[in-house]
Amino acid sequence: RLAASPVLLCTCPQRIKEFCTMPVRAVFFDLDDTLVSTSAHDRSAFRACVELTGLRRPGSDGEALVAAYKRQLSKAPWDPEDKVPISDWRAQLWVAALDEIGQVTAALVQPPSLVASTSSRRASAAELGAELQHRFDEVRLGEFAWVEGVLELVKRLGAAGLRMCVITNGHSDVQHPKLKVLRASDLFEHIIVGGDEVRAGRLEKPDAGIFLKACELTGVAPMEAVHVGDSLSSDIAGAIAAGLRASIWVSLGSGLVSENGPCPDFTVTSITELPIVLDELGCLEGPSLS
């Protein structure tokens, strides 16, 4: 495995040569854990769910419930047939998590009526599942915000004449509420949601097509665009497959890149380091951004 420095160039000499032949005219951004610290907001929301579990079922292990829910979520984050509303689907995942830890038939303290029958307690578990999902969404969206410095960064890039597009994977009914609370359309002219592409019969990242769609929207050739995101498998692999000028990885963890996996052209620890990378490319039109 290769260790990544805060700003790391790890391409072959031919790629470095190609970097300097055309100006960068567009920047594509991932959303979650790139422009927004989604994982941190998720942790806040899950803490709220642990607290709610303690109120509704004193003595229950809220941490174990959240861990079980995450396992359920990783297996099926939404209805594969896209028929069940996302909130209902994820409420069912909470019930499945309760079942996994043996808590489906435990009695609730709230709502006030304690019921004796198993069927009634299963109904109460469904109520708790819906309440937990509502609480998660409420807390996460309530604090959802751009990473500090993003607003200034986007304004600087726009002033430099760069065109921008957000490319975000995820279910439409999960991503659009995030974008709405951020007022993302006020900041970005072009936004592509992977879930919308899937509903239209296309593919989301890492499919090259979604990056090429961003090129069409911004009016640039692939070699005139760079993409920045936190996922090696989706963002970096997709940018490489689409033939973009450069792939820029936002490393949130160890900064290690697998020798056999997609290798980003640059690695940064925060989206706010992007101007350093654009200057490093040496082919920006106009004054330095860093």
Image (spheres, rainbow, N blue to C red):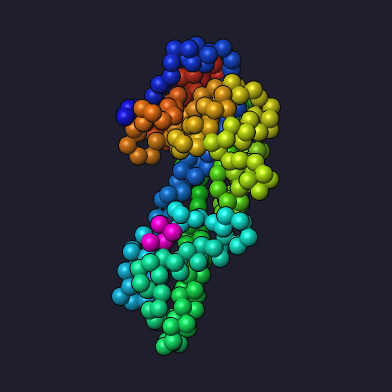
Q: Does the image show residue 290?
A: no
Q: Which residue of the protein is positioned furthest toward the front in this rendering?
A: 81
In this picture, which residue range is highlighted in magenta?
68-72
Direction from residue 36 to residue 202 in the image, left or right: right
Magenta stretch contains residue 71:
yes
Looking at the picture, how far across and down is residue 15, in whole percent?
Answer: 49, 16
Magenta stretch contains residue 198:
no
Residue 196 vertical position relative to residue 9 in the rendered view, above or below: below
The quarter of the picture where the N terminus appears is: top left
Residue 107 vertical position relative to residue 242 in the rendered view, above or below: below
**Residue 58: which quarter of the image?**
bottom left
Q: Which residue is drawn at 56% across and 42% down?
A: 168
**Residue 156: which quarter of the image?**
top right
Looking at the picture, how far across and down is residue 20, in whole percent?
Answer: 53, 13
**Residue 220: which quarter of the image?**
top right
Counting labels gives 0
Looking at the picture, how far across and down is residue 128, in whole percent?
Answer: 46, 73
Q: Which of 173 and 126 is in front in this view?
A: 126
Q: Which residue is drawn at 44% across and 59% down?
A: 72
Q: Does the image show residue 86?
A: yes
Looking at the picture, how far across and down is residue 130, in whole percent?
Answer: 51, 70
Direction from residue 63 to residue 218 in the image, left or right: right
Q: Residue at x 49, y 45 (%)?
A: 32
Residue 196 vertical position relative to residue 5 in the rendered view, above or below: below
| Most frequent secondary structure within the magenta stretch | helix
